[in-house]
Image (tube, helix red, strand yellow):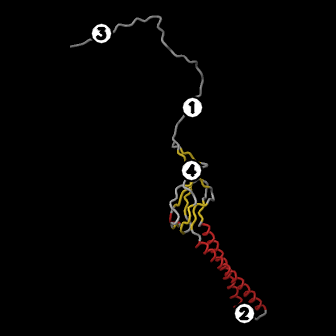
Amino acid sequence: MLFRSRPKPQQPVTADAQPSVGVRPVAAQGVSQSFEFVGRIKAIEKVEVRARVEGFLEKVLFREGQAVKAGDLLYRIEKVQFQALVDQAQANLVAAEAMAVNAKVEHERALELRTKNFGSIAKVDQAVANLATANGKVLQEKAALVLAEVNLEYADIRAPIDGRIGRTLYTAGNLINPASGILTTIVGQDPIYVQFPV
């Protein structure tokens, strides 16, 4: 069985019906492309704060999340042993300087006796060696004093940059040292980078 569709009768077109068309005047305009990317803010400066000497943590002197300035005191390690080492190094330096003064006097005396033919060349040589040894000991003790003073300063852990400080991983009473790892992190906030994956 076949079905045939009948053609639809056409509507008569009248002269009064006009199509609705929008009209705009032509104008020259620049067209610019635009792109959108998701950016991520990243600090230019970031510092992981670590201990440089070993000792018991006496105080934590900041509040987590606060803004800190370069030079602000963050942690304090007990200083008794470091101060004792500085005092000992100072005493050793004084003793070494006294020995150097004595060696210099003996050297001058040996030279004077030798010029008057009352002393031997061996005595002069010994005095020269003693003076050089004493001067070397003074330099050693000066270096030991500098090291002791630096370690005393390291007992105060200070902020190296301006920024916002993070969470502290150690609290007062803990034994910390260079192997303890990161104590806290400081992130600089001005200026910063904004990174876009293009």
> Residue at the location (57% across, 47% down)?
193
Q: Position of residue 84 (x, y in %)?
A: 61, 75
The foreground one among 97 and 77 is: 77
Q: Amino acid at mark 4?
A: Ala
Q: How far apart are labels 2 and 3 at the CA level?
A: 146 Å
Q: Amino acid at mark 2?
A: Ser
User: Residue 6 got which mark?
Assistant: 3
Q: Position of residue 159 (x, y in %)?
A: 60, 59
Identify the mark nearer the N-term, 2 or 1.
Answer: 1
Residue with the most extreme left position: 1
User: Residue 43 got which mark?
Assistant: 4
Q: Amino acid at mark 3?
A: Arg
Q: Position of residue 147 (x, y in %)?
A: 62, 71
Q: Secondary structure at mark 4?
A: strand
The reply to whether callout 4 and callout 1 are in contact (CB within 8 Å) is no
In which quadrant of the rendered image does the N terminus lie?
top left
Q: Vertically, is 63 above or below 139?
A: above
Q: Secondary structure at mark 3?
A: loop
The reply to whether callout 3 and callout 4 are in contact (CB within 8 Å) is no
> Residue at the location (54% across, 34% down)?
34
Nearer to us: label 2 or label 4: 4
Q: How far apart are labels 2 and 1 at the CA level?
A: 99 Å
Identify the mark nearer the N-term, 2 or 4.
Answer: 4
Query: Mark 1 = which residue?
Result: 32
